[in-house]
Amino acid sequence: MTAANVLTLPLSESAKAVRDSRPLRLITCGSVDDGKSTLIGRLLWDTKAIKEDQAATLRRDSTGKQNDLGLPDFALLLDGLQAEREQGITIDVAYRYFATDNRSFIVADTPGHEQYTRNMATGASTADLAILLIDARVGILEQTRRHATIASLLGIKQFVLAINKIDLTNYDRAGFDKIAHDFKEFADTLGIRQITTIPMSALKGENVVYSGAASMPWYTGPTLVEALELATVRSSQAVGFRLSVQRVSRPGESFRGYQGTVAGGAVKPGDSVMILPSGMVANVSKIVTFDLVRNAAVAGDAITLVLDRQVDVSRGDMIVAIDNQPQVGLSFDAQIVALQPEGIHSGKRYWLKSGSRRQRVQVMPVSQLELKSGAWKAATSLPMNAIGKVRLMFDEQAIFDPYDQNRSTGAFILIDADTNNTVAGGMVSGKRASIDSMDQGNGRVLLSLPADLAEQIMASELFASRRDEAEIRHMTSAQAAELWANAASDI
């Protein structure tokens, strides 16, 4: 059995018999010149998403740039900024729409350059699936690993590994199998399990919309479009009802409503809810939108919620299901991507913005991902574009769901209080256990482990399920020896 046969898996067990009404949001990412814009241009062209006037403009703009096949430069459909066309690279995030008979799609073409990592993270933050392009002649690069890691951290579970420009390797199956195997090994370290690997030529359109079996009889898996049609949309029902209050509406003395967009779950009149962080409880009496009274609201709905009693609610508070609440605390663990040249420094105070809530926070970097090896190394600061794990310490109660359970209530940005620049984007892993709780009760065990072994243990499902009960400190061997010596003297 070859690596191709092992890795080319369907994204769901069976094809949908009817058209899926939910559009699939996807992102293309990878290193520079891997052919991302060309791939999306080919998708738009072959799915007939290009209008006649656009096609005419493309042919005109491609004058003198046609390839050996006499085809237009598909990348021009995506690289809309003049600066992008002049440099031949993608800078901005370009969103495009296309559809097949079975499904509609929203695709984000993101930059490959390291300096535009923030743009890539923006595109990935709302995606259900990532198409990761790799040049068949070059193989996996550091930027490939960076983009795969960011996409994974941002909660993307479905990946299509598009090994592009396979025609330039004379459709070499051995080279395809090696890249597929190497990526599978790296993906295992990120916990990525759902991978469909496809050899393709975006320029020629082989295995994009139409089959490339004539050139690659050894590949029997799906085309890119077939794989996309079978992908699943990320559910917003992983947690209970969530409404981050954006505005308190009081048009008159007889009406008080709390406005915002439902960030998870569902709500209906009569449901009991809790206001956080105060902990006050009320019942929903009415759900109002701009033009009617609703009998229910679900994730994505912009609503005004009316409660059955007078409660103290302010902008930034969260109204949640009473039987399924988010985590509230002063300390959280998170993963971030540093976005500015000044990086992230230990102990510095930032503004943290999540939904409509803005709070002061102190950030303590704990470790940084080494992209070449895939290992997490201890760190006290994070340079620009670094991916790191941090500890967030708040002055007042913060409210989060783990990001893997709810993107809206688990994501945040860090803002430099001096410059107002957005310096990082982050995802909350979970509430951090109080240090004071370490000596409560019996049965506590203190372990001193090598960092790599500790990381493997922390990556296990069992540890993740009880993460809030553990206290972890990164230290040198000398510091650990001193801690043990002090502990022994206290016994």
Image (spheres, rainbow, N blue to C red):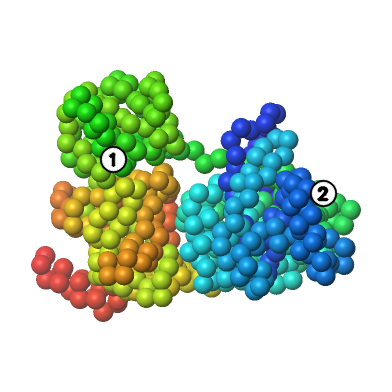
**Position of the C terminus by quadrant:** bottom left
Residue 483, percent from left and from top: 20, 72
- Which of discs 2 and 1 lies nearer the camera? The answer is 1
Q: Would residue 77 be seen by someone viewing this image from the given angle?
A: yes
Q: Identify the mark nearer the N-term, 2 or 1.
A: 2
Q: Left or right: 235 with respect to 286?
A: right
Tell me the amino acid under the disc marked 2: Ser
What is the number of callouts on the image? 2
Q: Work out how far the residue at label 2 is from the one at label 1, CA to CA, in angstroms.
A: 52 Å
In the picture of the structure, the residue carrying the numbered disc 2 is: 211
Tell me the amino acid under the disc marked 1: Arg
- Residue at the image point whose x is 31% and y is 73% from the top: 345
Residue 37 vertical placement versus 10 (above, below): below
The front one of 83 and 223 is 83
In the picture of the structure, the residue carrying the numbered disc 1 is: 247
Quarter of the image for residue 131 reads: bottom right
Could you say whether the residue bearing mark 2 is in a helix, strand or loop?
loop
Quarter of the image for residue 277 reads: top left
- Residue at the image point whose x is 43% and y is 53% from the top: 460
CA neighbours of label 1 inside 10 A, class few (<14), some (14 to 19), many (20+): some
Whether the residues at callouts 2 and 1 have beta carbons within 8 Å, the answer is: no
